[in-house]
Amino acid sequence: MTVSDRDTPTDLERTGPATCSPERLPGGDLDIWVMVLGDLFFFGCYLIVYMVFRDRSLEQFTAAQRHLNMSIGVTNTVVLLTSSMFIASAVQAVRRGAPRTSQRLVRAAGACGVVFIVLKGFEWHQEVTHGYTVIDEFFSFYFVLTGIHLAHLALGLLILGVVDRELSSTHRQRPSLVEQGATFWHMIDLLWVVIFAILYCMR
């Protein structure tokens, strides 16, 4: 292992434990929290609309749900929960002053996101091939909800790319930026857990 491969202290890490202490509470500035809470609010409103339509056509929605691929749904849930574990560990690593370890964990979380996209794309193709499209009321909600989530996931991957570039810097690695990326990524995971519970599991 060369010197460049090891985690080396940065100027930010030498400023003291108040900046990088692993015991700090989950971070992220006000802007990221406004963004996350705003997303959750609008997403929650759409879920309420879905529940109203589902209640009005319960038998139709329940019958359509049976055509979803539960195996892919479960696998994608495990993939995103694993990515959450990676990104949480990345935050702890950068707070400890280990930016290279944090970078590897961020990349692992991003790889999980790519796996999710591939599986979701395959599932979409499978549904459309079998004739389940937006013409069906349930599948119109299904494609909108999963599509919105997929757009957030793509944005999350872009944010992780920014975090990765930050951690590659030889001058400084800001724990706050990693925390903000992690906050957004955890929101993506939370949205998927809710989608999976409502679309795949609720009968």
Image (cartoon, rainbow, N blue to C red):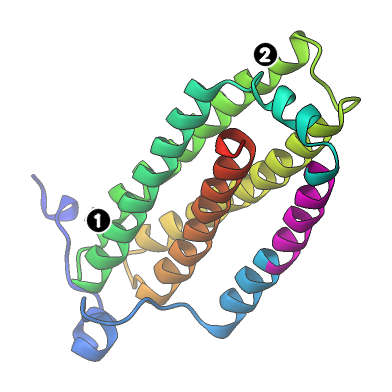
Q: Which mark is residue 100?
A: 1
Find residue 179 and report its image quarter. Answer: bottom left
Q: Nearer the viewer, residue 13 or 87?
A: 87
Give the magenta range.
41-54
Residue 62 in the image, given as x and y percentages of width and height: 70, 29
Find residue 6 and report its image quarter. Answer: bottom left
Q: Is residue 188 left or right of residue 104?
A: right
Work out whether mark 2 precedes mark 1 in sequence or the reverse, and give the earlier one: 1
**Residue 51 seen:** yes
Q: Amino acid at mark 1?
A: Arg
Give me the C-alpha separation between circle 2 and circle 1.
Answer: 39 Å
Q: Which residue is mark 2?
A: 126
- The residue positioned 47% from the left and 77% from the top of the image is 28
The C terminus sits in image quarter: top right
Q: Nearer the viewer, residue 91 or 103?
A: 91
In the rendered structure, does residue 187 fall within the stretch colored magenta? no
Residue 111 against residue 168 in the figure, above or below: above
**Residue 162 seen:** no
- The residue positioned 48% from the left and 21% from the top of the image is 71
Residue 24 against residue 115 in the figure, above or below: below
Residue 133 in the image, given as x and y percentages of width and height: 83, 22
In the rendered structure, does residue 49 fall within the stretch colored magenta? yes
Residue 192 in the image, given as x and y percentages of width and height: 55, 46
Q: Amino acid at mark 2?
A: Gln
Q: Residues within 10 Å of mark 1 (few under 14, many from 20)?
A: many
- The residue positioned 77% from the left and 29% from the top of the image is 59
